[in-house]
Every structure is written in structure tokens, then in C-alpha cells.
Image (cartoon, coloured by chain):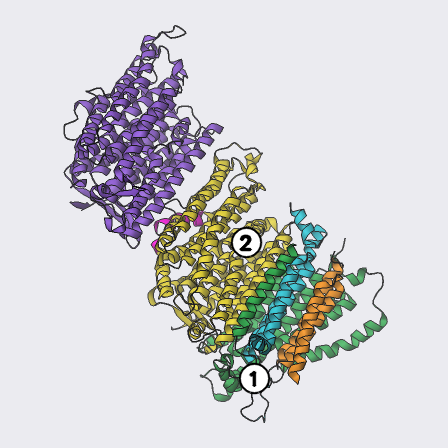
Chain colours: A green, B cyan, C yellow, D orange, E purple
Amino acid sequence: MRKFLIFLCLAICWVVFLSAVVEMPPFGDPANITNRHVVPRYLEEGVEEGGASNIVTGIILNYRGYDTMGEVTVIFTALAGVLAVLKREDVKTSTTMVATSPVGPSLIVTTVVKLLIPFIVLFAVYTILHGDVSPGGGFQGGAVFGASMIHYTLIFGLLTYMRKIRLAVKVPLESAAILSFAIAGFIGLFFGQKFLTFLMPALSHEAQYLLRHAMLLLIEVGIGVATGIIFGSIFASLEKVERI
Amino acid sequence: MIVQKLGANFNYVIATLLFCIGLFTVITKPNLIKKFMGLNIMEASVFLFIVSVGAVREGSAPIVVKGMEKGVQFVNPLPQALILTGIVVAVSTTALALALMIKLYEQCGTLDADELKGMEE
Amino acid sequence: MAGVSGHFPILIVVVPLVGAALTPLIGHWRRRLCMPWAALVMLFTFAMTAFLGVRLSLHGPIGYHLGSWEPPFGIEIYFDYVAALTFVIALFGFLVIIFSKRYVEKELEEAKISTYYTLILLILAGMIGFVVTGDMFNLFVFLEIISLSGYALIAIGGEKLTAMAAFKYLLVGAISSLCVLLGVAFLYSITGTLNMRDISHMLTLTDATRVASVALALFIVGFAVKAAMFPLHIWLPDAHALAPSPVSALLSGLVVKTGIVGMIRVLFNVYRINGPLNYGPVLNIMAWLAGITIILGAFFAFFQNDIKMMFAYSTISNIGYIVMGLSLASYFGIVGGLIHVFNHALIKTTLFLCAGAIIYKTGYRKLADLQGIGKKMPITMGAIVIAAVSIVGIPPTAGFICKWFIILGAIEAGKPVLAGMLLLGSLFIVAYYVKIINAAFFREPVHEITEVDEAPASMLIPIVILAIGCLLMGVFAYAPLAFIRPAVTGFLR
Amino acid sequence: MLWRLDIILLLFLVATALGVYVTKDLMAASIIFSAYSLTMAIVWQQLSAPDLALTEAAVGAGVTTVLFLITISKTVRRED
Amino acid sequence: MEVYDIRPLLAPLISLVCAVLIFWLGDNTFLRRLFSISSSVLKWMIVMSMFPASLRGVVYVTELLPFARGIGFILRVDALGMFFAVLSSTLWIITTVYAIGYMEGEHARKRFFAFFAICVSTTVGVAFAGNLFTLFVFYEMLTIATYPLVIHEETPDAMKAGRKYLVYTLTGGSLILFATAMTFYLAGTVTLSENGILSLQHGVNTLFFLFVLFIMGFGVKAAIMPLHGWLPSAMVAPTPVSALLHAVAVVKAGVFGITRIVYNVFGFHLIKQLVVHFSGVAISAGSLLALAAAITIIGGSLMALLQDDFKKRLAYSTISQLSYIVLGVALLAPSGAMGGIVHLANQAFMKITMFFVAGAIAKKTGKKYISQLHGIGFKMPITLATFTVASLGMIGLPPLAGFITKWYICLGALEAKQAVFVAIMLISSFLNAAYFLPIVYRGYFVKPVDGDTAVSEAHWTLLAPCIICALYVIALGLFADLPFVPLALAREAMTTFLR
């Protein structure tokens, strides 16, 4: 009965949505306002102004860099939140499900994973570094990097993971994305420009572009590394089992 | 007329439908993990909606390759940039929610919303 | 716009953000330095917001184009009169951090201390960013920062029900965020832009009013959840009552206000009141729901016996005040609503900090256990009395001014029945604060709380400052009005 | 022609979403959810959003599913 | 003539400062007494220093902190306000002395005296309020400050009474707030003016509604039936509180508010025109109010007859007497209004004497019921003598204060051509006699049960206030027509309002 009422309510919701959908600009029409109002500038000037052939990357890092700064903050917040709820894994008190399970990982799996992981990491690095010319970028690469760590932890256990990446390394790297954004932003302030400005008219033409390239790279790498490490940390926190 | 319009905007129809399915899952399923899968469905549906807003028929991906002739119709890159942020937000929310669920299970021994409500009193 | 001060609009967001990012590092190095560090960061931010506030009152709103991109292309920070709220956020944030010191040392595990301050800084940075941004999508991003850190802070204590409360909040909050995002999507599809002022301009050109209406409904629902308006308030009492007290103070005092600020942004900055869309029915519905919120919140509060639960329900009814004021859409109504955003933040922060101090000292939180506490902790309970008198709306304290303006607004808008609802609600509110005061001052202690004495100085100082604020804001009510009046004039233009 | 494929994909999305709803085994449901995410990634690729497709495939289908799985393995597997 | 002066602000501020000092240092008995008495005397001096000029028609004004268009914090001392302020500050000195004696050995004296001071501070604030807004501010502060006094005993009875008190008065306060906001909306200002600020153009029905709101709001504290329920139960408070607050400050604030509403918000002329037709019957605002007052006069007296608890009987007597004032104001005739205003003072002195006596007897002998008072006049002859003076005054015997009131109110009734109210006054006098004289009779002419007739008066701090107040009662009647007496001020007030 309750279910049915909810169903009815949501059906009405859907109809309301549809009534709006009917009025929306036709799907995929180049003449839509969305394609005429702000975007043409991105498409026409994006490569030159934004500094990336992949215009999405240009928008993410340059035009709407502040959003991305918010984004990396969100994932940093998620990590802080997970740690607030579950605490960080600890060599002394934590163990993993793998260690507690009666059947260890089989030889085949461990060998394959050992072979595979370098390639996954390589792919992650490629994705991060080539974000400006091809699909991908810091976040995508970071996710892949994180996935590789998750993979590794899943098979070899938390302790090995903790031994490989120590806390003193992990903590600064988790903050790396926000900090790299801040550094890139403050470079703009240093040259008397607005926060997160990438082109400094005060410099010569070549220096400007070189600096922009360096800043974009810094941010990309920062995001990539931080995302990967944060995913790893979140996973480790979720996976750890308190040793009794 | 209306059907034709809806047919033309089929992506939006599906996105809003998925939104409602997700919401239905969230509200009616007692299991918290299931609720959260519903929420993820909702999230993805909203993303689908926004990407569809930016889609252009026969448009190519917004990556400028050297030697490309002028006047190529690109799709709208802005929604894509937004959704990239959106996906991160979604996965962050999921991670936190799952952490809470694990904690909740440690404390209460169940993830059933009805049983948890009973414990609250 | 010379020198560093020209960059203050962005620095008030970035400084606490960077501060938050550095807190785990500092915590890893020396755990004890986390609190001074967080306090320092907030003090610095507070100084900047104070500077901006003065600038604002002298020269009017300040726009800041991030990355030097002009508005529709890049993100714009727009420090307008509503954004003067950042001053309050930074100040209260600072006070809450000071208050937290002893509380955290006692209640939290060692390992969570740096995480705690990280999250506090994040939530403050998120709120400041939320309030000053002039971009719809950026609004969503900061909303998420606030929400995520809020969920985590509720559960940080680790008591049995906190995870449940946090999860409830998370589920409802995530749905509301999605509603906001979907609203942004609908708006984007008909305006092609994300900048608020640009959307507002483009809305006058579009004829897709149905899409705009659905988007408005989505925004209202989304922000109403964050603001805990009836009937979307279910998550609030548990979340606010079970969180650690300084966090409750932040959540109840400031975080629910982000929902309000969101509504203000959407209603008055994006869908302008005399824009193409006649949203009278929406406002009417909101006003009536707000009236119900006031009465129900107060009504439920009366039947609680946990003081924090009482304060939490009281927040709900006060949110009703604010929303009622805003949705009256008359000059005095909006003025009253906006003042109450500020005054309620002040009052509720005081109340929750006091509750925190009491729980810290006695370990009790049920009213029955706290009988006679007024004689043992006179300063803390005195602050509660001042705040209670204030929230009830007894002149000449802060709460009265809002009540006066909202009633005036209701009469101005020709809806005196709403004013009646407000007054009825405020009488209910009296009832449960009297219950608290009676228990604290006019009854003999039941427990052996005889050796309890006043809270430590690091807790008392913020409490006393805030309580004095409650009194001063009643007498010097024109001080916030200096910011609110031009804001409202701008809305109604 | 491609747009016809899109319709099939979209309908498949609905099917997987309903599948998540009806499946009682949470492990299975999370795998179906993973399929939902992957389908979504393909839809986005069809809409010329390769960046998103890449992200959704890595995050939506990969990381999120793994997180779900680890939670399920630490808590309950059956819904009822 | 308006003169800017700081004194209107100083007067309420002094006792507020006193309250803070008592909170801070009040654990020391000597300091507490010193602060209480010195501040009451100081305040009296400040108020009196404005008195002569006020009699000449000078209006002192302090204006501070305007926080919005047309709304600010204004203190303005006109003749009526002066009247009320002189009254309350004079009585405060007497009551403070009495309270020091009475509260000897009671608990929580610090709290008691601090809130006592705040109460008087706010009462003077009510008197000096220059606009409805300020009036409301002080009116509500008075409510809150009285609460701890009402529940001073902390017994379940006292708590219940306190709750009842808050429910009644805060509801009334809400109505006033609403009405004030409405006034502001209609008139664009809330500043009290000599001839009212509203005009007929706002619509008779709206104005009538507004009038009823105001009357209901202030009527709670003025204890107009059926809004009087809180007053008898609030008598559980210590006697000085009952005396000063429930016979003088709180209830008079309500009556004073009604006077302000009738003459300074609506204005004499507007009220006269305020007639609504309700299903064919014409109801005028003035007669409605007068009718309510008449019902309360008779009803209160009848209820008083039924009480055996001494203080309860006095309380119902208060309810009845308060409506004399309301009736006088509602008659809308110069003499009637004058009589009403004078009764503010007359009733205060008479009733406070009675309460003091009741308190002194209770303190000395522990007797709280009238049926226990056989032969009390043998033991405490002076005390009972003062009571006799006061009750004869209440009945309206010629050379005493009460007579002046009744004379003018009857005159007003005749002026307004509503002779029925003369009859009401006569009946009420008869009832007054019926419930006061048995006490006197029982005290003097019935031998005490235990046969102990040795004289043992209460402590001088309790006795002296009784005597002083009784002397006042006589003086107010004998010298009613001299300058510098309440009547002169009331006349000054009326001449400005009715101009």
C-alpha cells in the first residue's frame, strides 16, 4: 500500500518532469541556446586560451578551474570523512580480510596481478600526462592509479600496502591536489593577476606559454597523484579489520 | 505532437525515468546498501541528463586535432566538464556512505532500515 | 583594488581550504598544534571578511573574476550584501574552534583530532565559498563540500546512534543535492549559461517557463531539505542532537542557513521577483509550510527531554520564521527573514555551545538530570537564559527584531493569519524554554552534581562573547540592517 | 543508425536499473549496477563525451563497485 | 514644549544598574540593602526633579537607537507618564523597606531583589515610553522580570501559578505585538501623540479590530474579565511582590497601556467615532470597553466575597478596582478620564496598604485566612487601623482617596450621559463594604480564640510602610485639590489629550 502510494507520487513526478521535457529545446540541435550562448567561445578560442587541445580539459583546468578546485576538495573531504568515521588503518591494530580468510590468494592470481600492475600504473601515468591532447586527465588517470592500488591491496593484503606506501608519504600526497591548485593560483597573484590565472601578460610570449604549461602540468599531476592515493586510503580504511 | 516531442527528447525521458526509479529504490528498499545503489542510479541519471543537454547530433568529441578543417561541429564541452566534477562528487558521497554503513553495522549488527528504526527507540 | 586586499574575495575561500589541506600534515607532525593552527586560519579569514564587510558597506558589491575570465565564461565570485554572512561564518567558526579544544580532547580519540579540525575548516570554507559564489554549478560543488563534511562531523563521535543519524542525513542530503543539480541542468538547457546574473538575464529572454518552473521547484525542494523545512525536516533532530556539541552549534547555527542562502540566491538573484515567472503560488505554499514548520517544530520541542533535542527542534521552528519572512516577498518580510538568518545563527550557536559545556561538565543531557544546574554553572546557564529570551523574541534582545519585522511583513503582504501562526509558534517556544529555565534555576538538584563547577575558560569565552552578542544585537539592531536593507532593495528592484 | 543503437542502450539502462531494484542478492545487484555504469559509459561515448566515458568506466563501474563489494563482504549479503 | 534630556533614560537605567550590582555583589546583605534603597531613592529624586516642569506642560524626550524607518527607542515624559512614574518610584521606596523586613530569612534573596529592581526599572520604562514599540519592549521585559518573583517560593503551586502567569501575559504580549505592527503598517509610525496617530481613513472595521486586539492584549495585565485568571493564582508570591507588582506595577502597566491606546494611539475623537454595526446592532468601541469594565467591577467584587484567603480576596478586589480605571478611561468624558487616572494612584496606595497589612499579619502570626483573624485588632491595633483606613477609602468614604475617584467617575458617567454606570459604581461601593468591613469587624470586635490580647506589632520595617501608605490615603483625599498632587497631573494630562 505504502509502496503503491510512493509509486504514484513518483509517477506524478515523472509526468511533471515530462511536461518540462516537452518544452525543452530539441535534443542534439546545434541551434540550441546551450550551443550558442557561452560555448562558442570555448570551442573557437579554447585551444589558444585554455592551453589544451582537449577542450574539456581546458574548461576543467582553466575556464572553470575553481570548480575543479572544489572537486578535489570534495574528494579530500570524503577521505577526511571516511577517516573520521572509521579511522586510518594502523600497522599495530589492523589486519585485512585477505589475511583472515582461510584460503589465501592463489599463485595464479598473485602472479598475474604482479605482472599487470606496472602496466596499469603506466596507463595511469599516460592518462594523466596526456590529458591535454586526448581524453583523460588528472582525475581519470588518478582513478586508474587508485584502482591499481586497490587491486594490489585486495590481493596482497593491507599490510603489504602499508609497507609500500608509508603514512609520512601518504598524508602530504593526499593534500597534493588542493595544494597544487593553491600554488598555481598564487602564481597568478604573484604576477598581479586574478587567482587561477594562467597567462601572465607581464612575461614574454614564450615564457607565458611555458609557465602555463608548467602550471597545468603541476595541477594535472597533483590531481592525479592525490586522487589515486585518496582512493587507496579510502579503500584501505573501508577494508581494514580491527585485530582483536 | 507531444509523443513526437518526447521521442525527439528520448534521452531526457529516460534520464528522468531513471531518476524516478532511483528515488523509488531509495525510498522503498529497506536495505541501506540497496538504498545507496538507488542513489547512485539517480546520480548517473542526472549526469546522463546533463550530458544529453550538451549533445549535438553528428557532433564530434571536443578535441581539436591538428590538421582538422575549420567548421567542424563539436559537441558542447561544458556539460562534460561539469559532469566530470559530478562523478567525483558521486563517488565521494558513496565512499563516505559506505564507511558510515560499515560503522553502523559494527554498532548495530544490521543494515535494515526498519530494524534500525526499532533500535532507535 | 590595489594590492592583496583586491584578492580577498577569493582568499576568504582559499585560505581555509589550504588550511584544511595542511591540517593533516600538521597533525601528523605535532598533534597538539592542530587547534591553534585552525584557530589561526579562521582568525585570518575573519579579518579578511571584516575588511570586505567594511568595503562592501562603503563601496557596494565586489565582483571577482576567477582566472581573469569575464563572467559568463569563467566563474565569478560576487561579494554582495548577502555574502556579508561570511563575516558571521568566519567569526562563529573561530569561536567554535576555540570552544572545541577541551571538548575534543575529552570526547574524541587521539587519532581523530586532526581529522576533526580538517573537517571543521572544510565545512567553514565550504560555507564561505557557497555564500560568495555567483555561479550555479559552483554553488552545487560547495554545497557538496558542506554536506560531506557535515555528515562526517556528525558521526565523528562514534557513539551508537550517530552513524545512523549521519546516514539519514546523508541519504536525504544527497537526494537534495541531486535535486539542485537537476535544477541546474534544467536551467542550463534553456539559458545556456551558469552564471547567476547571466541566467537571470537569459531567463527574461526564454519562453520555456514550464522548464523554469520545474527547475525552481527542484531548487526549492533541494534547499528546503538542507534548511529542514517541514515536511523535509525528518533528518534534522537526530543529526543535530547527536553530533558533538560544537558541531551541532555549527550545523544548527550556520549549515542549515546554507539552505536558506541557496533559496535566497535562487528566488531573488536568479528568478527575480518581478521577472518573467510568476511564482506567487510557490511563495504562498512556502509561506504556509513555513507557518506549519514554526508551530510543529515548537510543538515537538516541547515534548523532548533531551536539551539538545529541544534545541534541534527549535532550529526547525526558527527556520520556519526565516522561510516565512522570505516567502512573504514583502520588504519587511525579507528584511525580517534575513536578520533572523543572522540572529538565529547567533542564538543557536550560543545555545548549543552552552549545552556542550554542560554535557562536558556533567555528562548529563536529559532535562530531568540537569535540575538545579543553574546554581552550579551560573555563567553558562545565564547565557542559555539570555539566548532563550532572545529566541523567544522578548525585547530588547536579538530575536525580537526579527519577529517584529516578519509580523510587519506579513501584515504588509496582506497575510495576517501567517503572523498569527508565527505568534502562536513563538508561544509554544516560550513553553519549552521556560521548562529548561525552571529546571535549571528553580528546582533542587536530583543528582550528585554538587562538585560540578563552571566550564573551563576556553569554553566560557566563546559562550560569553556570543551571549553578549545576543543582547547587543537587540539594542544595535541597525548594524546588520546596514547590509540587509540594500540587499532587500536590490531583490525588489 | 547510431541513434537507433542509443535507444537500445537507453532501454538497457532502464532494464539494469530495474534489475538493481528487484535483485535480492546484494552482490549480484552491485554487479548489475556495474553493468549499468558501463552501459552509461557507452552511452556517453555515443554522445561524444570520451572523457566522461573513461571516467565513468574507471570510477562508476570500477571503484564504486569495488567499494560496494567490500562493504557487502564486511556487512550483509542478502537484502532481507 | 519638548525638551531633550537624559533624565528619562537615567530613571529606568538606575534600577537596572542596581540589579546588575545586586547580581554581582548581592550575597552581602548590607550591600544588597544599600544598593536597593539608595537606587530607589536616587530614582525617586530623578523622577521628582522632572515633576515641576512636567506640571507646567514640559515634555522631556530622550531618543536613541533608531533601527528602522520610524521605529526607534524613544522615552518621552508627558504628564500621564510622569504620573505613573512618580507613583511607581514612590511606592518602590516604601516597598523596598517593607521587602527588606519581610524577606528576612527567606531563600534566594539576591535573585529576589535583583529582579525586583528590574521590575521597577521596566515599569518606569513603560511610563516613559514614547512610542508603542518602546512601550511593548518594556511591557514584555516586565513580564519576564516578574516571572522569577512569582515563582519565588519554588513550590509546585508557585510553579503552576508562574506558568499560568506566563501563558496569559505572553499571549497578551503577542496580541500587542501584532497590533503594534498593524498600527505601524496603517499609520506609518508608532510614536504616541497627544491626539492619536490613527485616523478614520483606515476603515472603521480594521480600526475596531485593532482596538479589540490592543484591549485584549493590555487587558490581560489589566485583568479585565475574562482575562483575569492569572492574577489570583499569582498571589502565591511573597507579599511585597503581590503588593508592588500585582497591585501596582504589573496590573497598572496594563491599565496604563489601555489609557495610552485610547488617548494616544486612537485619540479621543477617533474612539468616539469608532462604531461598528454588527448584525444591526451598533457597537461603539468606548461602550464595549466600558461594558467589559462594568462586568469586571461587579464580577470581581462578587468573587472577592467568596474568598477566605486574605490575599486572594485582595486580589479579586484589585481586579474589580482596576476596572474603575478602565471604566473611567472608557467613558470618554473629561471628568471620567481624570477620575480613572487619579485612581491609578489612589488604588495603588490603598491596595498596597492592604497587602502590607496582610503580609505583616501573615509574617507575624502565620495567619493567611480571614476566618482565622478573630481579634487580630487586639494584637496588632496599628496594623489593623491602617487597614481600616484603606478599606474605608476603598468603599469611598468622603475625606479619603477613594471618594475622589468615585466622585469624578460618576461625574464622567453623567457627562457621557450613561447614568447606568453611576449605578454600577454605587453597587460596587456596597460590595466593597460587604467584603472589607467583615474583616475589620472580626478584628476589632470578636475576641481572639486563644484569648491572648497582648499587643505585639510586627517589626518596624513592616509597620512603617503600612502607616505611611495609610497617611497617604488620607492625604490624597484631604488635599486633593492642591497643586503637586496626582489630581493636578491628571488634569494636565487630560487637557492635552482632549484638546
Q: Secondary structure at mark 1?
A: loop
Residue E253 drawn at (x, y percent)? 31, 36
List x then y, in percent, for residue B23: 62, 63
| Discs 1, 2: same chain | no
Q: Residues within 10 Å of mark 2 (few under 14, many from 20)?
A: some
Reply yes or no: does residue E270 show up in magenta. Answer: no
Give the residue type at disc 2. His
Query: Magenta segment, which residues?
Result: C464-478
Q: Which mark is residue C233?
A: 2
Residue C468 inside the magenta-drawn segment: yes
How packed mark 1 is, by other alpha carbons closer than 10 Å (few <14, some 14-19, many 20 or more), is many
Closer to us: E252 or A78: E252
Q: Main secondary structure of the magenta part?
A: helix
Residue at image point 77% right, 77% down: A116
Residue reaching furthest to the top: E451
Q: Give the distance between the C-alpha atoms of the residues marked 1 and 2, in whole angstroms.
A: 46 Å
Work out whether residue A210 can be spotted: yes
Q: Position of residue A132 (x, y in %)?
A: 59, 83
Q: Quick one: quadrant of the N terminus of chain E?
A: top left
Reply above or below: A214 against B94: below
Q: What residue is shown with label 1? A: A52
Q: Label 2 is found on which chain of the structure?
A: C
Query: Residue E386's spot in the image, x, y percent?
Result: 28, 18
The quadrant of the rendering that contains the C terminus of chain E is top left
Which sits in the foreground, A179 or C297?
A: C297
Residue in view at x 37 percent, y 63 percent:
C487
